[in-house]
Amino acid sequence: MSIVEEKKGLIAFGAILIVVLIAALAAYQMTGNMGIEDRFTTAVGLPSGEEEGETFSGFSVEGDPVL
């Protein structure tokens, strides 16, 4: 058996990994670093920018905080 035949699975895994990384980088280049909330807030009529109100560890409370 040659070295290529012994490592056929590792070579296939490496090739798949390279293809997935290239696809991920292409998707990032196409979409940019905006999240889905940033991208579609204007489409649904919400105000853009940071949300006003109380925050708790980076989470904003919507509606009445008492409820």
Image (cartoon, rainbow, N blue to C red):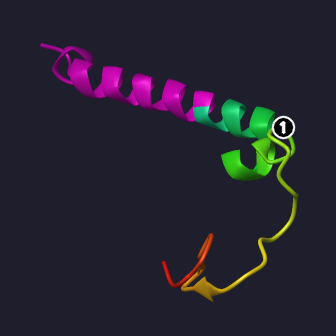
Give the overall secondary structure of the magenta segment.
Answer: helix
Which of the 4 image quadrants contains residue 59?
bottom right
Query: Could one spot residue 31 in this view of the protein?
Result: yes
Of 6 and 46, which appears nearest the observer?
46
Q: Residue at x 68, y 45 (%)?
A: 36
Q: Residue at x 87, y 57 (%)?
A: 47
Residue 30 horizontal side relative to residue 8, left or right: right
18 is within the stretch colored magenta = yes
In this rendering, is residue 20 above or below 35?
above
**Picture coordinates of residue 32, whole percent (x, y):** 79, 44
Residue type for callout 1: Ala
Which of the 4 image quadrants contains residue 40?
top right
In this rendering, is residue 62 above or below 13?
below
Identify the secondary structure beneath mark 1. loop
Q: Which residue is mark 1?
A: 43
**Picture coordinates of residue 49, whole percent (x, y):** 86, 65
Of 44 and 57, which appears nearest the observer?
44
In this picture, which residue range is highlighted in magenta? 1-23
Which of the 4 image quadrants contains residue 25?
top right
Residue 12 horizontal side relative to residue 31, left or right: left
